[in-house]
Amino acid sequence: LSQIEYASVRMSNRPKKSNNNNFLSLLSTFQLATGSKSQHITKDGAKSAGSGKFEDTSQGKSTVIDESKALPLRENIERMYQIGQIKRATTLPSSKEEKECFGSKKTSLNKCNEKSKCADEVEDICVVHIAVCVVIVDNLPHEDVWRSWMKSTCSDLVSASTETIKAEAEMYVHAKWPTKVNSRWVRSKLLPISYRPDWNDVKIIRAMLALAQQALKDKRTTHILFCTESCIPITTLNEAAIRLNSPSSISGNINLMDRSFVDAYDGKSSRCTRFDELSCWEKLQHVIPRDAIHKALPGWCLLSTKHAKSIVDIPK
């Protein structure tokens, strides 16, 4: 339980609050991490439902406060860290069926979605639907490559676990100058909005978030791949689908389709340049804990829908 103790220490290092507030915050974090439905105590000693809210009667009137909205961005990110640590320390498969789902048995179509079931219960097929989210200026130079890649699928793919996989892909494009895009095909993939980002501009992040939000509207989407106009695929769609649904030595007790693949580095990495320190770490450390900041380039980021939803749902 050292990770839980670590989470408690991180919380204790924050600016001093009343002991009651510290207890409520730690209890709320633990309940979010464990999915506990138990009641938690309000400031005046009363009990309320475990929804992340508490009742404040300190001013003589009853006001329901939503902690998740009241906390600033930095504290929300720290809270996400703590929840992840607690989950890793406390989550274990609770039944034989769940253990089989997380183990070496065949996965299923519903495993790709939120309601995971064992292969015995549903058809033994898994759909991998990759949303390719591209940020461009006004042209997609490798359009032909991408169109060919998205069509290069066969009907019967088989993974190492002899599971049938169906590979699909769709493209979403954010253009700095959408009116200058000449390709009819690319125009059909454009978002209806443009943030007009400059080089190394925060508006690029806004464009990427907008692309992710649009891709998540399609219920078929299982993964989101971020790219720029200079990117090209280096493996076939079929091979990518099989790889995404194949276990690895670090998979652990997680749904294979919930894994994300990100080539990122932190501030201690030899890849972190002085430019990175000045333009990323020093500018972001006021709102994001410095040890939580990582940098990854588009083209080397493939997120599962589970993680993509967590990112777009981060409180603003």
Image (tube, grey):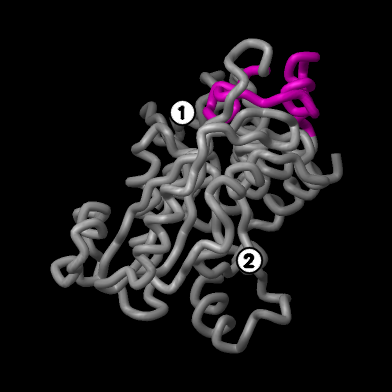
Q: What residue type is labelled 1?
A: Glu
Is the residue 278 above or below the residue 174 in the image?
below
Where residue 295 sits, quadrant-wise, is bottom right
Mark nearest the camera among 2 and 1 is 2
Where residue 103 sits, quadrant-wise, is top right
Q: Which residue is drawn at 42% across and 53% down?
A: 132
Within-10-Å neighbours for mark 1: few <14, some 14–19, many 20+:
some
Report helix, strand or loop for mark 2.
strand
Q: In this view, does 14 lie to the left or right of 194?
A: right
- Report x, y in % for residue 305: 50, 41
Q: Name the residue under label 1.
A: 55
Q: In this view, does 111 lie to the left or right of 71?
A: right
Earlier sequence position, callout 2 versus callout 1: 1
Q: Name the residue under label 2.
A: 264
Q: What stretch is highlighted in magenta?
A: 90-118
Q: Which residue is drawn at 42% across and 33% down?
A: 220
- Report x, y in % for residue 314: 46, 48
| Marks 2 and 1, how far apart at CA | 41 Å
Say which mark, if any, is on residue 94.
Answer: none
Q: Which of 176 and 162 is in front in this view?
A: 162
Q: Which residue is drawn at 27% across and 53% down?
A: 189
Report helix, strand or loop for mark 1.
strand
**Residue reaching furthest right?**
2
Is the residue 2 above or below the residue 117 in the image?
below
- Report x, y in % for residue 147: 37, 56
- Report x, y in % for residue 174: 30, 61
Q: Nearer the viewer, residue 31 or 17?
A: 31
Residue 45 in view, yes or no = no
Quadrant showing the N terminus: top right
Q: What residue type is labelled 2?
A: Ala
Q: Which residue is drawn at 59% across and 40% down?
A: 21
Residue 182 in view, yes or no = yes
